[in-house]
Amino acid sequence: MLAQNPIKHYLFSASSMGTKVNRTPLARRTQIIRCLVEGNSIRSTERLTNTHRDTVMRLMVEVGTGCAKIMDEKMRNLPCERIQCDEIWSYVAKKQMRLKPDDNRAEMGDQWTWVAIDPDTKVIPSYRVGKRTRENAVAFIRDLSERLANRVQISTDALSTYVDAVERAFGADVDYGQIVKFYDAEPIGPGRYAPPRVTGVDRTVIAGAPDQRHISTSIVERNNLLMRMSIRRMTRLTDAFSKKLANHKAAVSLHFAHYNFVRLHRSLRVTPAMAAGVSDRLWSLEELVEQTSN
C-alpha cells in the first residue's frame, strides 16, 4: 500500500461545519516566501517546506498582490537624480511563436517587465509587466515621473518607444540620453551560451543636457541578472515559467518589494529603500509577509 502524501499543510482549511478557518502560522508563511524570493520554484518550495503547491501558489499571489500595494504607496516623492530604464523578457503559458489563433494574446506569450532603477541608491521606484508596446512604455514612464520629486537624468537603450514616452511624461523637464552597444560579430561556437563581447558604445542626447558620462544602462542590466536569479519563473532554460499572467505579476511584485525593503545591498550595507530615504529601518521578511497576507 502506498504511503499517504505527507504534503498536507494548507493555507486555509475549513471545518466540516464551515464555521472555522485555520490559518497557516506566520513562521511557515515566512518560510515559504523566503524560499520563493531566493529563487526556488513552486515545486521545490513544496518539497522544502512540506506545503502543498496550491497553498504555495495562493500565498505567493496573496503576498505579491500586497507587495504591489506597498510599492505603490511607499515609492513616492523620491529624490533620485539619475534613472536607468530597461525591459526584460519572459513569457506566460507558452512562447509567442506557439500561440494559437484562439489564445488570449494579451495574457499569454511574450511578457516584458519594464524596470527603472536609481544607480546611486539602487532603489527601484517603478516597474510594469506587459507587452512591449508603445502604450505600456508610456504608462511605465508616466508612472515613473509621478514618483520623482525633482528633475532627473534618464538613460535607456535605443528602443524607439522610449522617446515618445519620455516626452509625454516629462515634457521639457528632463535630461534624457540613449546608449547603443555594439557587439563582436564573431560567431558563437557550438555549446557556448554567453552574450557576445561589447566592442563599443554610442551615446546620444535626446532631450535636455544629460551628463554623457552617466548615459548608461549597466546598473539596470545587472539588475536584470538578479531578477533571473531570484525569480525562478524568469530563469532561462527551465520549465518554471508562469502559467497565468496574474501569477507572473505577483511574483515580480514580491521580488521588487523584497529587494527594496528587506534585502541588504552589499555595496550600500543598507536596503535600497533606506538609501533612498523611503524607509528609516531594515524590514524583516516576516514583517513584509505579515503586512501583505491577511
Image: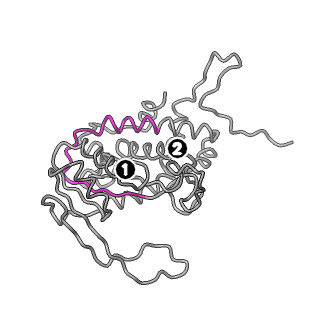
* Residue at image point 80% right, 41% down: 3
Q: Identify the secondary structure beneath mark 1.
A: helix
User: In the rendered view, would you say 24 is above or below 85?
Assistant: above
User: Quadrant of the image for the N terminus?
Assistant: top right
In this rendering, position of residue 111 left or right of residue 42:
left
- Outermost residue to the left: 209
Q: Position of residue 41 (x, y in %)?
A: 57, 50
Q: Categorize mark 1 by other alpha carbons within 10 Å: few (<14), some (14-19), many (20+).
A: some
Vertical position of residue 77 compared to residue 112: above or below: above
Task: Tell me which segment is drawn in magenta.
Answer: 64-88
Which quadrant of the view contains residue 222? Answer: bottom left
- Name the residue tied to disc 2: 247
Q: Is 107 within the magenta? A: no
Q: Nearer the viewer, residue 74 or 136?
A: 136
Question: In the shown orientation, is residue 2 left or right of residue 39?
Answer: right
Residue marked by disc 1: 136
